[in-house]
């Protein structure tokens, strides 16, 4: 018994010493009480609350633009520091936080990959699938699914103006659109108006768990080990993530098989440029899940912000109506949307107030350490990104930083506008970690917002509490109930042959 007690005491003493040493390294950086003693005491607790974006904003507002939220974790809302940390030649590396973003326990993807050389190899191959020429070819696929979205709203909800959950409908749309441009085989969410193989339900269940994994780097090594089959989704599953993986596995196997067809889509580019079958199977899952969720979040937020702001709505509708009189084709092209300055301002402002991805994505300070504005950053410390706080920083955005005001993008001088644009671009990452699907996402958002507001007037059922929204690095949103009313008929748009 004495031996057991002695061992217990020794372990407790060792734990206390280790905790104290960790606390000591970052003691010069302020943060919430006790956050420096345990990951559980602040980071995990607030992550699981679903309120992490606003909690981080409060932390940086109270303790400064660099604050401590864990034994070895800092967070910054200083966008210039984050650009310094993530620029192309930076010596900061991805931290082990990213291990929690694997879809497969034993295989990294381009998002979770920590090794710089392997990450660069994957990006070089995959980037070609999102080239301007490729996306120009694939734009008609986006049009097809916008048409399906409009038809679904018209046929199912417009008469007799039944309220519907636009949070759900937006995700049905983006899952179909992104899967089609990725491997020319849409899942059929819009056609069935249902959560095929309960994928959205599974995402809602799994995202909070991923939050825990990313906050505990010790899981990094555990995740590398083979896990019991009952813990891992299987492509043979009839529902959930496994069923989704099964569809992707089947499509990829056919495309890499002996009778493979040369199809012009993102997967076709991956194949042409040397991605292995196993890599392609993993990467298309990541691209579809990440792109569909983030794009749906942006579309939901912009619809909410515009529909509940009459002056913005009037201004946007005037620009849309003027544009429709001159447009050629059934759907506006992405190129033409870029000539509509107020629509572009609406999208920029929507992304500023509701950045679709708010994960910490922490980097590890290089061994020699670093210093920023007089604050010493010890080597080996992790520092994450508070994008929500940065995009609502009153020093940059003004006293109305929390307000939806697209006009701010049209009234500032050139230097101020450049600074705003540089900050806002961080919504899509920076340096070697800019979102591969950035242009595809912007194309989908601009075109969809234009067509939705051209055809319908949206009324939010409960403006005071429009939806349930929780932030776990990505947003889980539901119960966004709206009604859609047809706008007055206008002359049909000119077709290409009439131009």
Image: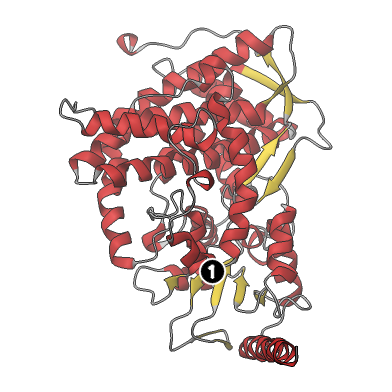
Whether residue 488 appears in this view of the structure is: no
Q: Which residue in the protein does label 1 denote?
A: 217
Residue at x-position 72% and y-position 34%? 311
Q: Position of residue 256 (x, y in %)?
A: 22, 34
Q: How is the image coloured?
A: secondary structure
Above-or-below relation of 390 to 10: above
- Residue 299 placement, left or right of 287: right
Would you place residue 70 above or below residue 372 in this image? Answer: above
Q: Residue at x 54, y 80 (%)?
A: 381
- Examine the rendering and report whether any part of residue 342 can be seen: yes
Snapshot quadrant of residue 412: bottom right
Mark 1 falls on what kind of element? loop
In percent of width and height, residue 494 lies at 41, 11
Q: Position of residue 261 (x, y in %)?
A: 19, 26
At x 58%, y 40%, the residue is: 298
Q: Nearer the viewer, residue 440 or 479?
A: 479
Q: Residue at x 24, y 38 (%)?
A: 269
Using residue 396 as the reference point, say whether residue 149 is left or right of it.
left
Count neighbours of disc 1 (C-alpha within 10 A) and say few if under 14, some if 14 to 19, many if 20 or more: some
Instruction: Classify residue 104 as left or right of residue 343.
Output: left
**Which part of the image, by quadrant, shows the C terminus?**
top left
Identity of the residue furthest to the front in this view:
1
Work out whether residue 429 or residue 174 is closer to the camera in this orientation and state it. Answer: 174
Q: Residue furthest left?
A: 258
Of 246 and 306, nearer the camera is 246
Q: How many numbered markers are drawn?
A: 1
Q: On the rendered image, what quadrant is the N terminus found in? A: bottom right
Residue 52 image offset from top left, x and y in percent: 69, 58
């Amino acid at each position: 018994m004495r031996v057991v007690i002695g061992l217990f005491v020794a372990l407790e003493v060792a734990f206390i010493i280790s905790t104290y040493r960790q606390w000591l390294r970052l003691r010069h950086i302020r943060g919430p009480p006790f956050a420096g003693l345990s990951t559980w005491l602040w980071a995990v607790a607030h992550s699981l609350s679903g309120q992490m974006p606003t909690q981080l904003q409060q932390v940086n507002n109270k303790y400064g633009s660099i604050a401590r939220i864990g034994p070895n974790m800092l967070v910054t809302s200083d966008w210039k520091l984050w650009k310094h940390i993530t620029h192309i030649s930076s010596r900061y590396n991805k931290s082990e936080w990213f291990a929690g973003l694997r879809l497969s326990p034993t295989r990294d993807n381009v998002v979770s990959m920590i090794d710089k050389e392997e990450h660069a190899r994957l990006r070089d191959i995959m980037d070609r699938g999102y080239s301007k020429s490729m996306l120009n070819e694939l734009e008609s696929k986006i049009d097809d699914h916008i048409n399906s979205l409009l038809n679904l709203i018209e046929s199912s909800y417009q008469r007799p103006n039944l309220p519907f959950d636009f949070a759900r409908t937006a995700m049905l749309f983006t899952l179909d659109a992104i899967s089609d441009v990725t491997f020319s085989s849409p899942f059929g969410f819009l056609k069935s108006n249902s959560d095929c193989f309960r994928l959205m339900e599974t995402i809602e269940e799994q995202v909070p768990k991923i939050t825990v994994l990313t906050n505990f780097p010790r899981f990094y090594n555990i995740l590398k080990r083979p896990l019991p089959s009952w813990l891992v989704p299987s492509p043979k599953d009839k529902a959930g993530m496994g069923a989704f993986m099964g569809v992707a596995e089947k499509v990829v196997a056919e495309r890499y098989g002996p009778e493979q067809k040369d199809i012009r889509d993102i997967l076709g580019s991956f194949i042409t440029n040397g991605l292995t079958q196993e890599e392609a199977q993993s990467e298309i899952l990541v691209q579809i899940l990440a792109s569909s969720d983030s794009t749906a979040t942006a579309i939901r937020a912009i619809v909410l912000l515009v529909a509940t702001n009459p002056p913005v709505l009037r201004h946007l509708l005037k620009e849309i109506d003027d544009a429709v009189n001159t447009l050629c084709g059934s759907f506006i092209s992405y190129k033409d949307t870029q000539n509509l300055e107020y629509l572009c301002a609406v999208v920029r402002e929507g992304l500023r107030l509701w950045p679709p991805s708010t994960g910490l994505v922490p980097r590890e300070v290089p061994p020699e350490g670093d210093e920023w504005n007089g604050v010493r950053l010890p080597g080996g410390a992790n520092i994450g990104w508070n994008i929500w706080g940065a995009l609502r920083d009153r020093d940059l955005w003004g006293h109305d930083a929390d307000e939806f005001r697209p006009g701010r993008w049209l009234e500032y001088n050139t230097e101020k506008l450049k600074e705003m644009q540089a900050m806002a671009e961080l919504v899509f990452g920076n340096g070697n970690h800019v979102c591969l699907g950035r242009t595809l996402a912007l194309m989908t958002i601009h075109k969809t917002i234009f067509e939705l507001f051209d055809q319908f007037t949206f009324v939010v059922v409960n403006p005071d509490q429009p939806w349930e929204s929780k932030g776990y690095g990505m947003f889980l949103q539901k119960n966004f109930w709206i009604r859609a009313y047809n706008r007055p008929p206008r002359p049909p748009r000119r077709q290409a042959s009439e131009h």
